[in-house]
């Protein structure tokens, strides 16, 4: 199948000399510029998709700053994992509601650039992000930031709903439940302003736990929804699900190694409870 993935293009998101992006200089004050970049439109070529990607960050049990960032590449439409990257990362910014992108995007972008350098042949045609795109109070969530910074087609996949433009979580759930049987499974997220921010997708007739699909960057909403459906074997799109599985497994492994190291040190007399 051939997919049209994009009416939007990045505008000078990458430097002309080496194609890299200085994510370290990104700050909340840059949000208007990010939105302006997202607003640039141009015709995009039609081509078949070969690979889809998923990204995720999982945090260690006892820290809100130490985490594992993961990037998984799957073949499409087979949805078989063909490559994966990860990194042990430390957040340098505090969590602030609505500004998640500035806390996490540099770590995910670093994995994308690493893949671009090491295996450019496996660079995904579109990346699913465990985070929102334009379905965001400021119009640019994690998926949008990643797309602009790395010049990637991205799709935002949200598990929790951010209140925006008159839309509320309870209202969306009620609307999903009120859909007639023939329309069950998809609800257009149209705000009071008339703006369509994304779509809520419900699988297995569940209206209590929909996922929220939105444009990240360079992807039309109808394409984002169609690709999400094509990639869902379970509730979450397989690229995001596999990235989550990888990051969680590595966090558990690292925590086990750290605990074992602490135990060995204690047995060797390197750690003493009595310092007197």
Image: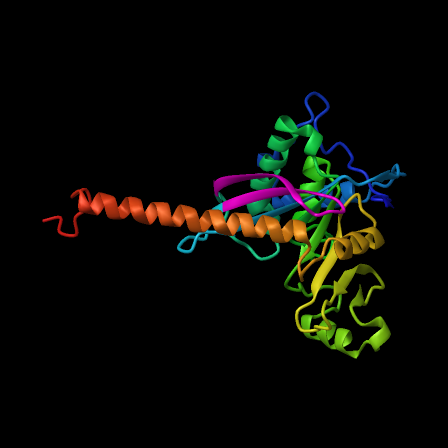
Residue visible at 87% across and 38% down? 44
Magenta region: 68-89
Horizontal arrangement in the rendering, residue 197 relative to residue 252 (left or right): right
- Is 220 located above or below residue 20 in the figure? below
Counting every numbered tag in the picture gives 0
Q: Position of residue 168 (x, y in %)?
A: 70, 70
Q: Position of residue 241 (x, y in %)?
A: 62, 53
Residue 65 visible in the picture: no
Residue visible at 76% across and 47% down? 77
Horizontal arrangement in the rendering, residue 110 relative to residue 16 (left or right): left
Horizontal arrangement in the rendering, residue 115 relative to residue 42 (left or right): left
Q: Position of residue 254 (x, y in %)?
A: 41, 46
Residue visible at 49% across and 50% down? 249
Which quadrant of the view contains residue 225? bottom right
Chief SS of the magenta region: strand
Horizontal arrangement in the rendering, residue 102 relative to residue 92 (left or right): right
Residue furthest to the top: 17
């Amino acid at each position: 199948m051939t997919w049209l993935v994009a009416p939007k293009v990045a505008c000078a998101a990458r430097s002309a000399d080496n194609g890299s992006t200085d994510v370290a200089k990104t700050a909340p004050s840059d949000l208007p510029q990010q939105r302006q970049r997202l607003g640039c439109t141009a015709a995009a070529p039609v081509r078949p998709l070969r690979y889809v990607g998923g990204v995720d960050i999982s945090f260690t049990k006892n820290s809100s700053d130490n985490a594992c960032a993961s990037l998984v590449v799957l073949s499409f439409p087979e949805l078989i994992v063909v490559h994966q990257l990860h990194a042990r990362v430390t957040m340098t910014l505090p969590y602030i509601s609505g500004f998640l992108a500035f806390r996490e995007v540099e770590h995910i972008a670093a994995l994308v650039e690493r893949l671009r350098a090491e295996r450019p042949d496996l660079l995904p045609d579109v990346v699913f992000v465990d985070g929102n795109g334009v379905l965001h109070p400021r119009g640019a969530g994690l998926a949008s930031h990643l797309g602009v910074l790395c010049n990637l087609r991205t799709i935002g996949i949200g598990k929790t709903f951010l209140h925006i433009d008159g839309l509320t979580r309870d209202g969306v759930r009620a609307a999903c439940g009120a859909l007639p049987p023939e329309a069950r499974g998809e609800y257009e997220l149209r705000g009071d302003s008339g703006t369509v921010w994304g779509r809520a997708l419900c699988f297995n007739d569940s209206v209590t736990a929909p996922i929220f699909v939105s444009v990240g960057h360079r992807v039309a909403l109808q394409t984002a929804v169609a690709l999400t459906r094509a990639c869902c074997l379970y509730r979450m799109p397989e690229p995001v699900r596999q990235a989550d599985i990888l990051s969680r497994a590595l966090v558990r492994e690292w925590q086990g190694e750290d605990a074992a190291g602490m135990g060995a040190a204690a047995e060797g007399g390197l750690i003493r409870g009595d310092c007197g």
